């Protein structure tokens, strides 16, 4: 059999019959997934109906136990979810050269390319993505789809607007479970009252092509999101797994119409570690490709400092994380990756 050159373009992964060496991961026992027969723990993240009268308690418990949950009755129309999924599919189905025309620049995050966390790993991940972090997607869309430009930009704008509302609603409820409100976060309170956006946000379209040897490959390596929270629309194809200390990796089975919510590092900081960010990853499979759309709801722009909410820390409890701007946190994250929260942790917290 001819050996596969290591010059693999991520835009062509789905056509490969053999797993190239640069994509092989050594997955160990710790990487195995909780067997569905385990009786000791709840088997996966809870599905929460947002119209449930007990929603605050349910969300609070899910956040503390799992750092992730699925939501039903979230108010996002199925049409919008289908539209953004088919937009993503149209993009990823394009020839590699076409996708590369939308490649992100060296400096920027917006555009087409490998997962941003790739730089922390020697091996490559079996996925490609398109990040929408600013208005530059409009230029890409115009050259990719001159005829459908308005329609596709409309889908992105509507998705951003709807997700922002949903994310704010989730933030209120989860804070409520800790006995505080958005008004207890100074910058969020100011943003709310001035009618500006609470945090910066991005949409990441992810594509995981079919893989010849899924057990030796990884779609997206283990990470936490640098967000307040992330709302993930996964197509009806599973692949997302969350990590829980007590039971290892747990698969999040897709529930039709439901969305997945992951707690990110910023919520971890705001809650002084009471609502920890969740480690998660994406696996791949050999018979169907998978698309996921992540709405990443991040921190405030500029020199605004974020810190644990004083009402949560309380008059006696020490604040575990030092004040930091969101830009600085992201810089640290892209230097030390999974040690970023430790890097801003106060060594000897005093009251
Ligand atoms: O595709 C998935 O299931 C996970 C995506 C993800 O974690 C991300 O985009 O940060
Ligand atoms: Fe993620």
Image (spheres, rainbow, N blue to C red):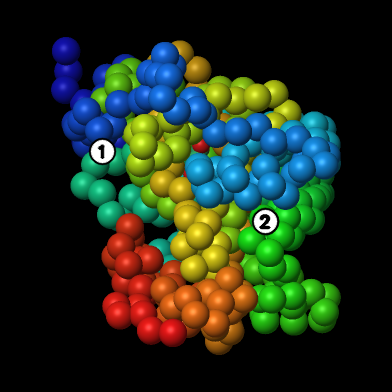
Q: Nearer the viewer, residue 8 or 75?
A: 75
Per the rendering, the mark at residue 177 is 2
Q: Position of residue 288 (x, y in %)?
A: 50, 17
Q: Quadrant of the C terminus?
A: bottom left
Q: Which residue position holds label 1?
A: 7
Q: Is the residue marked by circle 2 packed among few (<14), some (14-19), or many (20+) residues within 10 Å?
A: some
Q: At 34% across and 22% down in the image, what residue appears?
A: 214
Q: Position of residue 267 (x, y in %)?
A: 55, 62
Is there any visible trace of residue 268 in the rendered image? Answer: yes
Quarter of image, res 135:
bottom right
Which of marks 2 and 1 precedes in the sequence?
A: 1
Q: Position of residue 1 (x, y in %)?
A: 16, 13
Of circles 1 and 2, the one toward us is 2
Is there any visible trace of residue 138 in the rendered image? Answer: no
Q: Label 1's element?
A: loop
Query: How many numbered marks does the figure carry?
Result: 2
Above-or-below relation of 224 to 82: below
Q: Nearer the viewer, residue 94 or 122?
A: 122
Q: Nearer the viewer, residue 140 or 72?
A: 72
């Amino acid at each position: 059999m001819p050996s596969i050159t290591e010059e693999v373009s991520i835009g062509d992964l789905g056509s490969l019959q053999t797993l190239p060496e640069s994509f092989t991961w050594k997955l160990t026992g710790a990487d195995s997934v909780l067997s569905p027969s385990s009786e000791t723990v709840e088997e996966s993240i809870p599905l929460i109906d947002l119209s449930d009268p007990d929603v605050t308690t349910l969300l609070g418990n899910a956040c503390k136990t799992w750092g992730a949950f699925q939501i039903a009755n979230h108010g996002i129309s199925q049409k919008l979810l289908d539209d953004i999924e088919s937009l993503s599919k149209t993009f990823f189905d394009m020839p590699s050269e076409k996708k590369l025309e939308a490649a992100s620049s060296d400096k920027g995050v917006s555009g087409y390319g490998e997962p941003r966390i790739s730089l922390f790993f020697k091996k490559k991940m079996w996925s490609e993505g398109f990040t929408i972090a600013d208005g530059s997607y409009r230029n890409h869309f115009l050259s990719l789809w001159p005829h459908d430009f308005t329609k596709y930009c409309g889908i992105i704008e509507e998705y951003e607007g709807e997700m922002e509302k949903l994310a704010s609603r989730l933030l209120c409820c989860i804070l409520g479970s800790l006995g505080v409100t958005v008004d207890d976060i100074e910058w969020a309170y100011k943003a709310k009252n001035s009618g500006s956006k609470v945090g910066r946000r991005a949409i990441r379209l992810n594509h995981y092509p079919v893989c010849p040897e899924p057990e030796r490959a990884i779609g997206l390596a283990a990470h936490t999101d640098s967000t307040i929270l992330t709302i993930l629309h996964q197509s009806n194809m599973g692949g997302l797994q969350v990590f829980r200390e007590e039971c290892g990796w747990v698969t999040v089975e897709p529930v039709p119409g439901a969305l997945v919510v992951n707690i990110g590092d910023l919520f971890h900081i705001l809650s002084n570690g009471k609502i920890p960010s969740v480690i998660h990853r994406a696996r791949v499979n050999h018979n169907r490709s998978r698309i996921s759309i992540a709405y990443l709801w991040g921190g405030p722009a500029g020199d605004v400092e974020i810190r644990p909410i004083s009402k949560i820390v309380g008059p006696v409890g020490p604040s575990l994380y030092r004040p930091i701007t969101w830009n600085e946190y992201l810089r640290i994250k892209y230097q030390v990756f999974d040690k970023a929260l430790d890097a801003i942790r106060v060594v000897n917290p005093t009251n």
